Amino acid sequence: MNTVPESSKAEQPAQEGAEAPESPSATAATAEAAETSRQAVTDRSAHLKGAESAVLRCDELIAGYLPGVNILNGSDLYVGEGELIGIIGPNGAGKSTLLKAMFGLVTIRSGTVKLKGEDITNMKAHQLVSRGVGYVPQTNNVFPSLTIEENLEMGAFQVPGKFKERFEFVAELFPALKERRKQRAGSLSGGERQMVAMARALMTEPSVLLLDEPSAGLSPKLQDLVFIQAQQINKAGVTVIMVEQNARRCLQICHRGYVLDQGRNAYTGTGRQLANDPKVIELYLGTLAKA
Amino acid sequence: MNGVKIVVTTESGQPVAQVTTNAQGTWQVPVEKAGRYKVTLDVATLPKNAAVRGGNNVRTPTVYEGNMSTVLFALQPKGAPGQPAEEAGGEGSFWTQAAQLAFEGLNLGLIIALAALGLSLIYGTTGLTNFAHGELVTLGAILAYAFNVGVGLHLIPAAVIAVILAGGLGYAQDRFFWGALRKRGTGTIAMMIISIGVALFLRYVFLIFFGGQNEAFAQYTAQPGIEIGPISAAPKNFVAMGIELLVLIVVGVALLRTRTGKAARAVADNPALASSSGINVDRVIRIIWTMGGAIAALAGIMLGLSQNLKYTMGQDILLLIFAGVTLGGLGTAFGALVGSLIVGLFIQLSTLWVPPELKSVGALAVLIIVLLFRPQGILGRRERIG
Amino acid sequence: GGSDTATQPSESAAAPSSAAPAAKGDGTLTLGTLLPQTGSLAFLGPPETAGVDAAVKEINEAGGVLGKPVVKYDTDSGDTTTNIASQSVDKLLAQKADAIIGAASSSVSESVIDKITGAGVIQFSPANTSDKFTTIEDKGLYFRTSPPDKLQGRVLGDLVVADGNDTVGILAMQDSYGTGLADQVSKTITDSGGQVVERVDYDPKAADFSADVAKIKAKNPKGIVLIGFEETSKVVQELVKQGMPASKHKWYMVDGNTSNTNYVKMPAGTLTGVKGTIPGAAAPEEFQKKLMATNPKLQDFSYGPESYDATNLLALAAEAAKSDAGTDIAKKLAEVSKGGEKCNDFKSCVELLKAGKDIDYEGVSGPVEFNDAGDPAVATIGIYQYGKDNKYATKALEYRTGNISG
Amino acid sequence: MHADSTTNPVTATTERKAAALAAFKDLARDPGVPKPDPILVVDKVVRRFGGLTAVEVEHVEIQRGSITALIGPNGAGKTTFFNQLTGFDTADAGEWTFKGRPMNGVPAHKVARAGMVRTFQLTKALSRLTVMENMRLGAQQQKGESFFRALLPNLWRGQEDEITERAEDLLTRFKLAAKRDDFAGALSGGQRKLLEMARALMVQPELVMLDEPMAGVNPALTQSLLGHVKDLREQGMTVLFVEHDMDMVRDISDWVIVMAQGAVIAEGPPDTIMSDPRVIDAYLGAHHDAPLSETELQEQLHEAEAELEAEIEEETQK
Amino acid sequence: MDWVTIISTTVKAAVGVETVLYALAAIGINVHFGYTGLLNFGQAAFMAVAGYGLAVTVTVLGLPFWVGIGVGLLAAVLLAIILGIPTLRLRADYLAIVTIAAAEIIRLIFRSVAFKNVFGGSDGQRGFSDGFYALNPFPEGDYGFGWFTFNNRVTWVLFVGWILIALSCLIVYLLMKSPWGRVLKAIREDEDAVRALGKNVFSYKMQSLILGGVIGALGGFIYGLAFASVQPDIFGTETTFFAYTIVILGGAARVLGPVVGSMIFWVLLVLVNGILSGAVEAGYLPFMAPTQVGPVRFLLVGIGLILLLVYRPQGIFGDKREIAIDAR
Ligand SMILES: Nc1ncnc2c1ncn2[C@@H]1O[C@H](COP(=O)(O)OP(=O)(O)OP(=O)(O)O)[C@@H](O)[C@H]1O
Ligand SMILES: Nc1ncnc2c1ncn2[C@@H]1O[C@H](COP(=O)(O)OP(=O)(O)OP(=O)(O)O)[C@@H](O)[C@H]1O
Ligand SMILES: [Mg+2]
Ligand SMILES: [Mg+2]
């Protein structure tokens, strides 16, 4: 089963470099890529160079859910110490899958993930947590039958001593949570859940934070807060990888961005480069916000 | 009763014999043919202060060839009403009986609750509807029996060893079996059917090694009851109930308060998210299996103590365990306690009105009725829509 | 059910016996057992199988039947909750069984009787007690050596009254065995002037029996009749617990629960004075040793004698008929069971037969004399009493023999 | 395929839009203001959870043939309000009419049949049905949905083909055509949102209530779908939607209703509403005055950062 | 070892009465559970009321056979309605327990001494099948070929049974391909979503419960007629469990799943039994007594079940992709 629809194959931009131009569409894509190569660097050698000093890096990841169907088709990604990385892309591109694969929630079929030089491919999530990685899933990101407070307690599972201190911290970010600390998360509104999810990941003071659409469902006010907070945390030295559909905002704050399509890196570059790239705008960002 | 006149005739009224009772109040008439006879006691010959109970002084026994047939005239002091004395105190005896049954209900309810707790824990954390749980209950009892009767230990150390061992087996079960299945991504429905397979397997292993008969522990069998108010119960019942209640409360509170307890509930809600929060999901599940196994074993020992051991003992109460768990609200520890107590009480108390052979009907009907009004069980919570 | 055969259209009764392949006989007497290896009656399986085994062993030691050793296949009857019995019967029929010994449960027997008798094979149950089999349509091929409820119930009821129990409570297992026996006991007691103040039919699979016993306790009867199988030990515990020990009330038991192994772990004296009835003329001890020889792990002996007798009778009838075909054997079964020179094991009986004499097999379980319906007509009931050690003395207090019907 | 709608943003004011705008033109900006031609009229709906009053709406009317946005902070009660209206939860008090028919106490499926269909914020994909089957399910009055007619395929084949055609159309628009035969359970978060909305549109309702339809949907796709929503209005459908994306609200809505703490606090056309200080305070926050230029955005960000940093410093100093 | 007997009995089991009646029960469960997601663990009750409806009508009331069939079917429909009204609002796992409870209540009442006059207590009822065999077009004798040889009574039962199976499968096939079936499958996945799309979920669940119940009821008839008796304990929870096992073995929500599942189940049971007892009789397994064959067979069936589901969790016909999608 091929998940690539015929129509989008043609417009599919750069494959991952010149190594494997297998299909006719790939040749077309290379031409396109050449055109935009000033802004969007998709060269694998560039990746390799940049990845040398990376905190977290993925090389040629191939992963999927169902037997025989790969969702990630060899994506590369690295993030340097203290960097804020954004990942954008159409729905179903594999962004969430990429995060899950890095975090040990989807089985990686080939390729490697390294954290600070250590191979963490297919390592269990809880082991990564103890190595300082935090993760906010896109869906199902709270424990519905636990209260808000217990949800946060679970966030601090490995560092129970720090719970009080961190609780005060997240309560200040999202005052709604403190008021409702005894409410079961299952009865929260969509946005409130999102707050709990975000707060839960912040309980441990991770050194690498993976955020999957943290702003979805939040009110504009809180969306601001999330983006500011992400930057804030990043400034404090935390490496952040953020998947966002609020793409423009995301690219505005991130140091570098990746555009993922069909499980491959379509474009990479600095946030600003990507945000201004007409091709990226047309295919992934839309013009609504500018109109 | 001496000197009472008895007249024996055939069914059609032909006289056969007439005798008077001897000093012990007995008499005998040899008859020639098999058939139905009519025996009449001459009331006039009874002592002044005595009367035949029920007032009927005629009996029509059938005598068979080569056999004796006995006829009995029960006597009572004259003037008393026709009913036996103990039936007269209807009201009092109703409440005595109710009290006794309520006690029995608690006794049974606590055992069910203990078994239900183990089931509920495992269901709660892994989503597995474990039809083999009854066999884990049996396993506990049989292990204790092995150490008690087989090895010759006193029941108490034997029970302790059995509980520990069963805990270990619970651990091993998850470590080598259920855990491996989870890793393969086996769905909960498939696991449920697998648990039916496991139940079959274990049950027949028990049958092969333990045999099909009833057995009892070497100690505390048929312990005579003591009377406490309207209730008569064996001392072992009180001790057992104490232990059961203690375990239930300790485990229930631990689940609510301790970190591992909360982690267990977190795993129940969303294993992937739990793992993402730094919880070692496999470890939590293993702890739960260990506890579940140990608690089920304890329940089995208590059941064996209060009743007897048989290879189907767990299977026989499995439905009640499920009823208890469901009634209380699936996956909640205290729900299992409350639900099971209600099941236990209803089973016993319903016999005040329905024949005992149908006593389970009462409890099961209550289950259905309660769920009508509270579809999420007594302590369960409704889910939010949207 | 021979009595019914006459009223059946003759062709349907006769035709299968001529059509059925097994009816022709192949010279070897092949027996199948259909006894509970699994299910709720699994505890009855071992003694029954041991009874058959013991008999087959003796028969083959005595030279077999028709000059060939008897062949035996064991299958599982399960209980009614699974449909194993039917499959087992298929297998036995495929193995050309001439007679099938079983099942233990009346319900199971009922579910396979059509299949077995339809194939011209004898069904011989050592344990069925349901009245239904007396009238069931069986093409004259159904027999049983089961304990005769009616007589036992009468003897027991009489015993209860004779002991001066004017008020009696009955705790009976709720199945055809228990309710049948309880009905008979209850009737006898009432006819004799006793009063059955409470009768409780309990579900043998119930989680506990406290409510059932509490019901009896509320009426405080002098005598308590316990009818059931091994679950009686739970009932006994409950009686003791609720303050109705055998020292205060008189307890009575029946063949299903009068046991020397079931109660031994109870405190000494728990069962002192308790009386129980067991069919059969001989003290069971010697025979039990015989069974233990085939299965040393045996704990319970229920229906062992009946199974043993069934096997011997089948073998003798085959000898008498000079054929191993089911239909032929069936015709001779009543004949060898009564009216003739008495003998009580295969070896002696078969010698008499060979000498051309009419024999009357007297079994371990009783005299076993078949009536037209294939039910035993005469039986002996022994009355036993428990001592301080919670075992009953192997010598009966008395034996009572009588016609079962009537 | 999506390119046509992206490259040609619907700028021309169409007939329907004009009608809608005309209807709203002279209305007061008060909460609960009566509309000239309301399709849905809500009165005094209250829903409490324990001590929390999630919804307490005095009066609200939804104009027929318009696109109305319902906005409000998280936990304002928007979803709960939807739940009451569509029969998924029972209100503690209140009455509402749809097309003049009282709808309180009407079970959910009847509400939907009456022409009022909602989507779920937390999506409900029918996991082990294919995407196509999900879509087909949405169609109403299917002959094959009655037991006996189902047994005779000839009776429903024709209709099924029509439905399939319609579904294929929608799927293409929603960029799900490639997923047509995949199980819905194997969709990504955003794709589920898309399916949820597409499926609701299969019902062809008179009033469609969308609960955050575009949260998690790629902005380029959102843009093309907005065109589709506008088309719906052209077809005479009424749209009521909850959304936190102000760009979208501004782009397509004719009217905006603001909820906070269960109550409707303001109503008005999008531009007016977004400058309402109460709305800014309760909901929009610092940079309500979008669209922001990039520099502005950066500035604001820096401002906010500085503020926060100062706060943190303060705190660390303490 | 007597391989001929073993193979022939095994082959026979593949089409035998048990296979038929469990297949029917399982087809019903497949409608409930496989397609609609109703965890009905009370299928035995549907079989029971049908069997008893027939038996009581004919033996106790003395009415003709066809009336009995009508009463049995009506009883199954009524049971579905009575059971459905209160329980169809419950979540799946609660429904499971409630239906077990209801089935046990029914069994205990059928079995009780209190109603012995009507239902016959623990012995059940018999003597109601004459009407059925009077219709038997097969004259006295044996029918079939090779190992598939049955006497005329069994042939008649099997003939009717397999026709019923074929009919049921056909109906299920037609229904599940139709929009009606689509609604059922959607309900299985998420009721609320279906409600939001304007379908009357309760009504569909009820239709499903009735349809599956009636198919199960056919199994009850076959049981009663084949064995010429009905007994309460046959209709215990075990029967339902086995039927579920059969559904999963064959593959849930597959039209032929239950039929093939039933064949496999009984073939497995009989084959294991045959080989085991053959081996014991032949002395290959000296440590085993012949009477241990029964327990060991079930033990092996347990293991077989486990292995099958471990290595093929989707069953014989199931779709692996469906299993991979976590339904939770
Ligand atoms: N079943 C429930 N039990 C208790 N509280 C509830 C329940 N459902 C909703 N609430 C509370 O009611 C309030 C309103 O919730 P609602 O889901 O309607 O908010 P919303 O406006 O949709 O928010 P969002 O934009 O975040 O989706 C929230 O504070 C929520 O926590
Ligand atoms: N559990 C699953 N089983 C099978 N396939 C899945 C599963 N989850 C996602 N997929 C498939 O994997 C692909 C990528 O999904 P993913 O969730 O990574 O997308 P995404 O880029 O995060 O999209 P979105 O922006 O919509 O969240 C999609 O085509 C989806 O259909
Ligand atoms: Mg995603
Ligand atoms: Mg909401």
Image: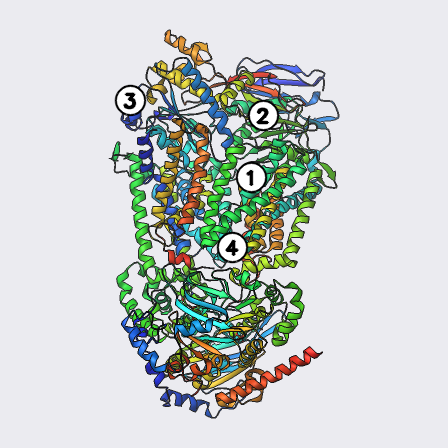
Can you tell which quarter of the image residue C123 is in? top left
Q: CA distance from mark 4 to mark 3?
A: 59 Å
Please name the amino acid that badge 1 sits on: Met
- Tell me the tag on residue B127: 4
Total count of labels: 4
Residue A81 position in % (x across, y down): 53, 73
- Label 3 environment density (alpha carbons within 10 Å; few <14, some 14–19, many ≥20): some
- Label 4 environment density (alpha carbons within 10 Å; few <14, some 14–19, many ≥20): many
- Tell me the tag on residue B313: 1
Q: In the image, ligand 1 is in what quadrant?
A: bottom right
Q: CA distance from mark 3 to mark 2?
A: 43 Å
Q: Quickly name the residue at label 2.
A: C259
- Label 2 environment density (alpha carbons within 10 Å; few <14, some 14–19, many ≥20): many
Can you tell which quarter of the image residue E47 is in? top left
In the structure shown, which secondary structural element does the residue marked by tag 3 occupy? helix
For marks 1 and 4, give the one nearer the viewer: 4
The verdict on a common chain for dots 3 and 2 is: yes
In the structure shown, which secondary structural element does the residue marked by tag 1 occupy? helix
For marks 4 and 3, give the one nearer the viewer: 4
